[in-house]
Amino acid sequence: MPKRRERMALYTRESDPRLADSTTIESAAQSVREHGERQGYIYDPDLDFREAISSVEVPYMYRKRLQDMLDAAKRGLFDVLVVTEIRAISRRQVEVLVIYDPVTEIWCPA
């Protein structure tokens, strides 16, 4: 029986709010998406979560796009979260563990 292709969500974060509409965040998101697609994951633009906000200054519960991603995870809309690196989720270890809980699998290309 062929393996079911898994649906991926992307979370891309830049620390500087001035980079919200930059080529920096766009190229990071594109790189993560392409890597996920090479792994055979299904890309849905509605599950592409991007934000430019400091994870040091702003706790995870106040980051809108991160909360949107967690809501999608709780509703079972994706199977794997693809990120540029774990610190994109948070710089605080305890937050990474809280965020990881509702997510089935986190995949980082590096």
Image (cartoon, rainbow, N blue to C red):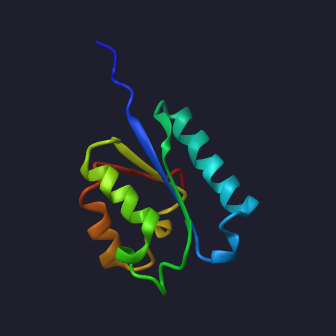
Q: Position of residue 104 (x, y in %)?
A: 28, 49
Question: Which residue is at 68% across, 55% downward?
Answer: 26
Question: Where's the C terminus, which quadrant?
Answer: bottom right
For residue 17, above or below residue 103: below
Question: Which residue is at 70% across, 53% downward?
Answer: 27
Question: Which residue is at 33% across, 50% downward?
Answer: 72
Q: Position of residue 30 (x, y in %)?
A: 65, 47
> Residue extending furthest bottom?
57
> Residue extending furthest top?
1
> Residue extending furthest right?
23
- Quadrant of the image occupied by residue 5: top left
Question: Where's the N terminus, which quadrant?
Answer: top left
- Front-most of residues 103 and 75: 75
Question: Which residue is at 46% across, 32% downward?
Answer: 42
Q: Position of residue 10 (x, y in %)?
A: 49, 50
For residue 13, above or below residue 62: above
For residue 97, above or below residue 25: below
- Front-most of residues 105 and 46: 46
Left or right? Give the position of 70 relative to 52: left
